[in-house]
Image (cartoon, rainbow, N blue to C red):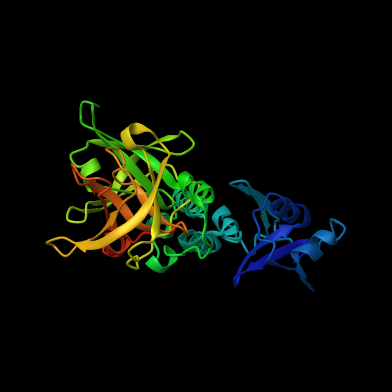
Amino acid sequence: MALNEYFVLWKTRSSGPYSDPELRALIKRGRISMLATVLSANQELTIDEFLSQRPTNGNPAPEHPESNVYQQEHGSISVKSTASERKLIPARQVVSLRYDPTCHLVLIGYALGLTSIFFMPLVFGSAALCIALLLIYRKKALPGGLLLLIASLFVSIGVAGKRETALANLISLNTVAMDLPDLRAATKPAVVHVVAFNEAREVIATGSGFFVAPHVVVTNFHVVNGANDVVVTLDNGTESSCDEVLSLDIKRDIAILYTRSSGSKFLAVDPQTPSDGERVAVIGSPLGFEGTLSEGIISAVRSDENQIEFIQISAPISPGSSGSPVVNRFGSVVGVATMVAVGGQSINFAVSGAELTRVIETSNQPITR
C-alpha cells in the first residue's frame, strides 16, 4: 500500500483506501465522523492528528507490471485501488461512517418532554415535538413516531399540571388582620364581574366571582345555569371568556370555571366554620356596580335540609352580588354570597368556606394556586 493511501475505521468497519486529498475532502464535507480512526501503512491517527499533518503526495511504492492502478468515479467519491484488489468502496459505506445523531436526538427529545411536565410545558414540549418531527422527516419513523406520542403526552400532562395540585397549596391563609381599606386593596384585584349569555348572545344573568387560582374562578351555580357562554370582567377591565367548567354543585350553588385570563391575585379559602359575631366584608358587583364593598358580621351559622352549611351575614348584598367572596379580616374567604331573605332586614346568606372546600376537593380536576 502506498504511503499516501489511508483506511478509515469507525464502529469496527473500515473504508478505503483514500489518498491524502480525498480523505481531507471527505472530512471537510462531513462525510466521515470526527470520532473515526485513520489507518495508514505504519501508523494509526485520530482525525485531528491526520488534519494537522502537512498534506503530501507521498512516495508511491513500485508497481507490479500487472497491478494497473486505475481510478473510478462512484457517486461523489473518487476511489483508487489496484488491479490486484479490484475493490470499490460504495458511497453508502462512507455515509455509514458519519456520526448518526438519532440516538442523541431521541434522548434529548425525551428529556425535553419530561421537563415539560414540571417546567414551561409549552416551550420544552414544543422543542420535543420539533425533534420528533425532525426524526420522522429524516425517515426515522419508529423513534420519531414514538417520541411524538410520548412528547404529546408529556406536554398535555404539563399543561394540565399548571391547573392541578393538592388542596393544601390552595389554602395559604393570611395571619395578619387588616382594616377595611387594606382589606379592599387585598381582595378587589381577585374579584370579577360575571355575565352569562344564551345562544342568541342575550344576557340572562349577571353576578360576581373571584379567583382562587390562576385562571380558576368561583361563582354561584344559579348565575351560570343555562348559559351558552360566560364572560368575566377582571379588575383591570379585561374581559375573558370561560372555556371550561371544572365543577358544578347544584346543592351548594357553586360553579368553578376555567377562564383564559388570570387574575393578579387569588383568594385563599378558609375551611374552618367561622364564629358568630365575627366581622366580615363582601366585595362584588351588586346591580352591576363593580368593586362594591359592604361590611357586617356573621349573624349565625346554619344548615339546610341537605345539611349544607350556610352562614347568615348582616353585610348588605343585592342582585348581582351572587358569587361574591365573603372575607374575614384576614382576607380569607369564609363564604360565597348566595341569597337574601326577601322582606328581611340585613338577613343574607352565603355558602360556607367549608362547603366550597368540599366542592374543590371533589372536583374532576383538583384546583391549585
Camera-side residue of 24 and 362:
362
Q: Residue at x 61, y 60 (%)?
A: 99
Camera-side residue of 138 and 78:
138
Q: Residue at x 50, y 53 (%)?
A: 131
Q: Is residue 366 above or below residue 42?
A: above
Q: Residue at x 52, y 56 (%)?
A: 178
Residue 157 visible in this rendered orientation of the protein: no
Q: Quadrant of residue 354?
A: bottom left
In the picture, which quadrant includes the C terminus?
Answer: bottom left
Q: Quadrant of residue 96?
A: bottom right
Q: Position of residue 272 (x, y in %)?
A: 35, 68
Q: Position of residue 297 (x, y in %)?
A: 36, 55
Horizontal relation, residue 68 to residue 125: left or right: right
Q: Residue at x 46, y 39 (%)?
A: 235
Q: Position of residue 74 (x, y in %)?
A: 59, 49
Q: Is residue 290 above or below residue 6?
A: above
